[in-house]
């Protein structure tokens, strides 16, 4: 188990370039199955979840290579399998949205029930009901989901909840359905727009992603070559800005899209940070002491992102006053609370609501990441705490951050990575 060792008290200063977005790269990698040719992806981040997705594609027969120019090149002609490997699929939940592209390419798909994860049950009923609406026949047997989509037809689909994964899965299946598909109450996350851009680069016809209503014209033969640049990671950007905020620092991020970060930038301003935005850059200058953020409610985009909840929980532990955080999206996403308490944080929690009361300072401690974003929050708290904080479970953080220690060291943090037992 690897750990990050953090010595607190060093404000983040300087400039960093934000990497490509994990939650855009994963659906785009799945969508590569739709194309039987050559694909070149720019700004695909080097992350554990990406490595696992590439391993799945390789087991299905695809090949890939990372170029010295930083591009990820995929050769999809050899992909012929439509059964997702159980071992790796359980490792990453997002393997479930390979159903859509497998159905689009082969008309069939078999995957394992992905099961829950650290932050909640993660059901897939909206994925399956959406695919069924397209005429996919689905049966479950021995923990496997067996899909027959040989005769998919376009449909009007109304999602009960704007699920990101379900929206993306339906988009990717519908490109091969006969006729038009409309998805209503679709997720509006920017990552769905990035997927639309990629699908259209493959020769598909998708419109409306980023709004609640998406139109897919099916029955298009994908072209043989395509390339795409993965959009910047708004959650990595927000995490680095929170690092500057909690340490009283001043940083500038390039390859960041302020329009994607509206709700979190608004909360950072409420905390007294000076934020300036250019087209693809965001700068933050933190106050000497963070002001009170009264309320954060996580919601589907453009509401406050659940993936930034833990990072703002950490900010609130050393801000003025008290902050109420309501986690509306996932049922078990406060596991960073008890770990922060070991560093001196003061909070109460009931069900999906936590109230954090700011303290003068945190003290370094040995803590453990329980999930990806909660782990990042513990590192942020360590940047601020007096003394040394050891954050065990660095592998969980590697799922969504490419060498977080290296990124933070480049901004002046005292942080190293130790491969422990
Ligand atoms: C995506 O997960 C992201 N992952 C998550 O990021 C992110 O937190 C989430 O969207 C919300 O923004 C990827 O894109 C790979 P959902 P996803 O379907 O698609 C319920 C991170 O840290 N639901 O929008 O799984 C579900 O239980 C990760 O980068 C159903 O009930 O999220 C949850 O309460 C964590 N039935 C809510 O919807 C379904 O069929 C949101 O889930 C599907 C979802």
Image (cartoon, grey):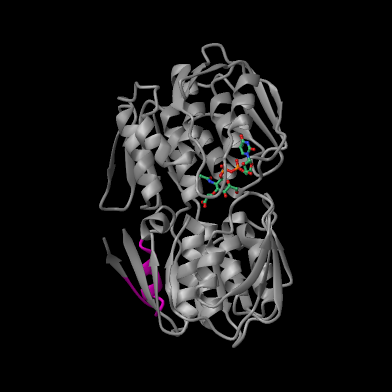
Residue 62 appears in the figure: no
Residue 414 part of the magenta-drawn span:
yes
Span shown in magenta: 403-416
Percent across and percent down for residue 108 are 46, 17
User: What quarter of the picture does the C terminus occupy?
Assistant: bottom left
Could you tell whether 184 is left or right of 17 in the image? right
Q: Is residue 399 magenta?
A: no
Specify whether 96 is left or right of 419: right
Task: Specify the farthest residue to the bottom.
Answer: 288
Which image quadrant: the N terminus?
A: bottom left
Q: Residue furthest top?
A: 151
Residue 365 in sight here: yes
Quadrant of the rendered image containing residue 56: top left
Question: How many discs mark residues in the rendered view?
Answer: 0
- Residue 61, given in percent of the width and then of the height, sits at 30, 27
* Vertical side of 370 occupied by 281: above or below: below
Q: Quadrant of ligand 1?
A: top right
Classify residue 312 as left or right of residue 81.
right
Q: Residue at x 62, y 28 (%)?
A: 216
Vertical position of residue 88 compared to residue 48: above or below: above
Q: Residue at x 44, y 43 (%)?
A: 228
Residue 126 x/y as whole percent = 63, 31
Residue 321 image-quadrant placement: bottom right
């Amino acid at each position: 188990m690897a750990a990050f060792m953090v010595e607190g008290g060093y404000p983040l200063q300087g400039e960093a370039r934000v990497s490509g977005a994990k939650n855009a790269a994963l659906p785009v990698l799945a969508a590569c199955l739709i194309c039987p040719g050559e694909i070149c992806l720019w700004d695909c981040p080097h992350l554990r979840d990406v490595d696992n997705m590439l391993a799945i594609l390789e087991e299905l027969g695809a090949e890939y290579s990372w170029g010295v120019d930083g591009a990820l090149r995929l050769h999809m002609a050899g992909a012929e399998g439509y059964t997702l490997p159980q071992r790796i699929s359980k490792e990453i939940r997002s393997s479930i949205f390979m159903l859509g592209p497998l159905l689009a390419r082969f008309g069939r798909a078999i995957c394992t029930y992905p099961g829950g994860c650290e932050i909640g049950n993660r059901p897939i009923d909206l994925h399956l009901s959406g695919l069924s609406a397209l005429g996919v026949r689905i049966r479950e047997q021995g923990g496997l989901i067996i899909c027959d989509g040989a005769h998919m037809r376009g449909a009007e689909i109304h999602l009960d909840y704007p699920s990101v994964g379900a929206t993306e899965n339906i988009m990717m299946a519908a490109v091969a359905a006969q006729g038009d598909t409309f998805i209503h109450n679709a997720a509006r996350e920017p990552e769905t727009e990035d997927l639309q851009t990629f699908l259209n680069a493959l020769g598909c016809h998708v419109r409306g992603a980023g709004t609640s209503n998406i139109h897919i014209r099916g029955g298009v033969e994908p072209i043989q070559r395509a390339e795409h640049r993965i959009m910047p990671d708004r959650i990595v950007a927000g995490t680095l800005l929170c690092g500057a905020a909690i340490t009283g620092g001043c940083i500038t991020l390039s390859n960041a899209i302020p329009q994607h970060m509206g709700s979190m930038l608004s909360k950072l301003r409420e905390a007294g940070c000076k934020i300036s935005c250019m087209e693809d850059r965001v700068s933050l200058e933190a106050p000497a002491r963070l002001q009170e953020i009264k309320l954060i409610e996580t919601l589907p985009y453009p509401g406050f992102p659940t993936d930034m909840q833990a990072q703002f929980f950490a900010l609130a532990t050393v801000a003025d006053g008290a902050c109420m955080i309501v986690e509306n999206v996932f049922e078990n996403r406060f596991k960073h609370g008890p770990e922060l308490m070991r560093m001196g944080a003061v909070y109460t929690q009931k069900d999906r609501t936590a109230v954090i009361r700011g303290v003068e300072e945190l003290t370094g401690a040995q803590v453990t990441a329980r999930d990806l974003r909660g782990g990042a929050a513990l590192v942020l708290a360590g940047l601020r705490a007096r003394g040394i904080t050891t954050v065990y479970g660095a592998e969980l953080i590697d799922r969504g951050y490419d060498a977080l220690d290296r990124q933070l060291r480049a901004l002046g943090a005292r942080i190293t990575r130790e491969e422990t037992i």
